[in-house]
Amino acid sequence: MKTPRPRLLFLIVILFTAFSSLSHAALSTLQQIEVATFEKMRDVERYQIKIAEKHFLAGKFKIALAEYEKFLTLYEKSPGAPYAQLMWSHTMMNLKKPKTALRDGFQSVIDYWPESHEATIAAYCMGDSYRTMGEVKSAQKAFRFLIMKYPDHEIAVRSRTDLLHYARLHQEMEERLSLLNQLTFGVKRTDAAKETCIKAAHELAELHCFAQKLADGKKALATTYAGPALFDQVCNLSAKTVQHLLKEPKTRPAALKLGGQLLATLRAETLVRPELAKDLLYRVAELHGTLGRPSNTWTVYEEIGKRFGVEDGLRSRQATWFLAREKRDQARRIYGEFDDKVTGQKAIAEMYLEEGKINEAIEVYRHLLEIDGDHSGDYFWSIAGCYEKLSDWKKAIASYRQVDRFPANYFAIAKCHRRLGEQKEAIILYNQCKVNGKAAPEATLQIGFTYEESKDKEKAIRTFQLTCKRYPKSGQASKAHSHLQNKYDINVTLGGTEEE
Amino acid sequence: MLTQSKRPILLTGVYAVLWCLLWIDAHAWFRLGMWTLTIGFLSALPLCSYWIRRQRHATAVVRRAVLSVCYLPLWQLLAHLPLLNFSYSLAASLIQFGTAGAFFLGLAWAVWWIDRATKRAPEPSKKNTKKRTWDPRQLVAWYFGNKNNKLRQSLFTLLTYTVIFGIMALILTRLSGCSLYESPLGGGEETQLKQIVKIQKVIDKKYVINPYSSVLFNPPPIDDVKLEVLEVTEHLYKIGQGKGDGAGFSAGTTRGKVRFIRLKYDGGDWEQDMDRGSDLNLLTEYGVRTGHPVSDRPEPMEIGRLKSFPARKSPPMVYMTGQQNINLSAKELKIMRSYLLEHHGMLFGDNGGSSGWEGQFVSMMQKVLPRIEPISVYLDHTIHRIPYPLPRLPIVAPHGRSSALGWVVNGRLVAYYHPGDIGDAWADGHSGVPREVWESSYQLGVNIIYYAHAEYNKWLEATKK
């Protein structure tokens, strides 16, 4: 027997890796074939698997199912057979048949190929199928079994995450803490498990801190962070804890005490890490706000200004501070001092809009058109919106016409025409919107409403029915259906579909 | 011996008692059939007519009193008649207007009585002027004060009457009685409903008869050919669950029937499509397709009344639809929870026409079962397979999501939510949807009713002492 040449084998592996990395982009880790298994398969088997996979990724699950079945019939003894059976089950899951997937798919993988890599995956998928079917107890049982049998496998991490979800839902604090402790301290942080473990560490730390066990919380975070990063995380969590404790009158003194300690710590840290002093001082200011000491916040802002100079970030915070105290003129003055004129003027325009000073807002947007011509579309859109608020429909139409946002601007123009009583023009525009496939159902529905406004009841009803008939699966069909029922007492909607 | 003049009064009194029992049955017991109730309510017509004619020459007060008393049975009759045509909204409106009428009628009599009693009341004795007068008929009663006594007496009358009327209305509308729900007796396996049609190819023998042959052929007469078509094409329309024979359920009773209960709730249009025969059509189709005895009418029911069913005799499934809001009180939520979990019931929600109703239903279920997450009910779930295997979910108009939602407790679906106004497809005329859609809508309806009854039956069998 000839041994394969190493160079050729290397080439196959390289090609396979490149190909699989492309094609497997949409496959989850539970759906990917092992490289070792793929290597052992014959070309013809690989080809068959690839064909099935192509259909699976394209969402053609019925065809994919047939292709996997074909593989199992033709190459029953292939090393890829357990994978084909596993993928057959995944396809069944996608066809919304988890019961069949579980009974005839995942279970078969375990029964026929108990030692295979796929059997382990199938065992997890069985639990997942139970969850999909709403059989929580069976799912929990399966996940607990997996943690016990494969403690170091990726699926044990997934199982713990799933169990954690149920512990949260059922408010089982003991189990929740136990699982979080396992994920934080017990599980080996591989590439696949790392993210889950970090999340768990954060959750555990938060639980400890909210229960006023700050040391335990810090210990949980120390599994992930060290040095300055740990300090930042602990500070963030402490601030969150202060916020949490302030909610209850009973825990308020503890919150104030913790807040005081945190303020001192942050101040001290500004001396240790002068390069981060500005950020730390911002945190101090924020914490004063949380503790209900706004005047201290302002003092800290002034301190930052003196020490590091005034820039837009500080100005923005100062303006927000004034806004929170309803000192709008001062906030506007600060926005006007922004180095980044565009951002400052946008904020001013928004403030005018909030105050109902539409004409002033238009003036600001016109000024923005002059200084930031690249985003003229956005400003014309805003100006048109302002004119709409002023019920100046003609000027709104003129502004919308200068925006290149089809079909949104056509819809907006049509709406203005309807307000002007020019229903014919609106219908012409809606018909033009129909060119865009996605906008067609909405355009048809709006045509119906436009006919209704022009008192053409018959055409309106016909258009609503058309919406139901042409786009039976759309939300617009739903609206047309209920409108016909409510307004015209018409139940013959001509819709109806069957959702696969 | 009774005198001739007292006999009609006595007979009317007996009739009044019977009428009250009839009224209670119509609102709380639900033992009598629709037509029995109608006949019972109609029987008030001749009696009212008799009393009106008899007292036509009496004093104005007596005549008005007779007319006022006659108002009650006639109003109830009027509110009952639309139910024969399943016009539940009309009946509800008549009840509301009738209640307002009864209120004002009673108020008029209360005003008349207090005025008359005040005039007739004896003057308070001048000896005991320091003693407080409590009698409301006396204008000098201490609680009327010293000024505007007449006005205050009128307000007092109005207030007292309104409170009494309100309490009575509250008591009467909260009547729950003790209802029973029994499934039909039978049994069988949970199998898919299949129409077995064996197509037999019959190759006719062709006799080639040579007219010149000397052999005589006798072709068989046509009557002797036995096709046995009826046997081989018999439909398996008798389905059930449990050990037993015939269509039905092993824990059912011979008088049991499958009923369709629609829940009434505040905030929305619970009665949607009921006037168009939606529920009745499904119930009839269920009876025809499964062979189970079914009730002759659907039943609208307040959520509060679910608690009136005793354990093991409660409805396996209740239906809920609408397109506006669902406002349930904390008590109703508790009753619903108890019905779903302790009484082993099932709630079937159908979105009648807005994506907002989906949110309303899901949020209601979140309050009823806070620790249960909804799942997307998959296509190979028993509810989608037995008795009819459904390859797709029928949708009349998609109001939100495209798949059904389910709430599972111990492997059993306790609530099923359909997003696509399936009730519209059951209604008369099927709302113009294609045949395949309304046919599968019926099939889904049958499946859901059957699933709920089968699960209920399994629970009854499992917990049998």
Image (cartoon, coloured by chain):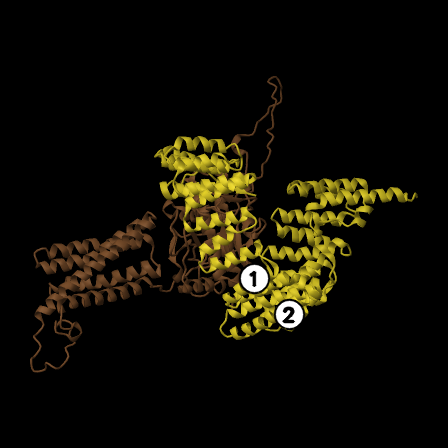
Chain colours: A yellow, B brown
The amino acid beneath tag 2 is Ala
Residue A311 shows in this picture: yes
* Left or right side of B168 for B428: right
Residue A282 shows in this picture: no
Q: Are marks 2 and 1 in contact (CB under 8 Å)?
A: no
Q: Is residue A146 above or below residue A6?
A: below
Residue highlighted by disc 2: A268
Residue highlighted by disc 1: B410
Q: Secondary structure at mark 1?
A: loop
Q: Is residue B366 above or below residue A344?
A: below
Q: Nearer the viewer, mark 2 or mark 1?
A: 2
* Left or right side of A175 for A461: left
* Left or right side of B205 for B346: left
Q: Is residue A411 above or below residue A239?
A: above
Q: Which one is nearer the viewer's eye here, A202 or B286?
A: A202
Where's residue A230, x and y in %?
68, 65
Circle 1 packing at 10 Å, graded few (<14), some (14-19), many (20+), is few
Q: Which one is nearer the viewer's eye here, A253 or A260?
A: A260
Mark 2 vs mark 1: tell me if same chain.
Answer: no
Q: How many marks?
A: 2
- Quarter-wise, where is residue A128 in the image? bottom right
Q: Residue furthest top?
A: B212
Q: Residue furthest right?
A: A1
Q: Is residue B298 above or below residue A427?
A: below
Q: Residue at x 72, y 41 (%)?
A: A70
Chain ID, mark 1: B
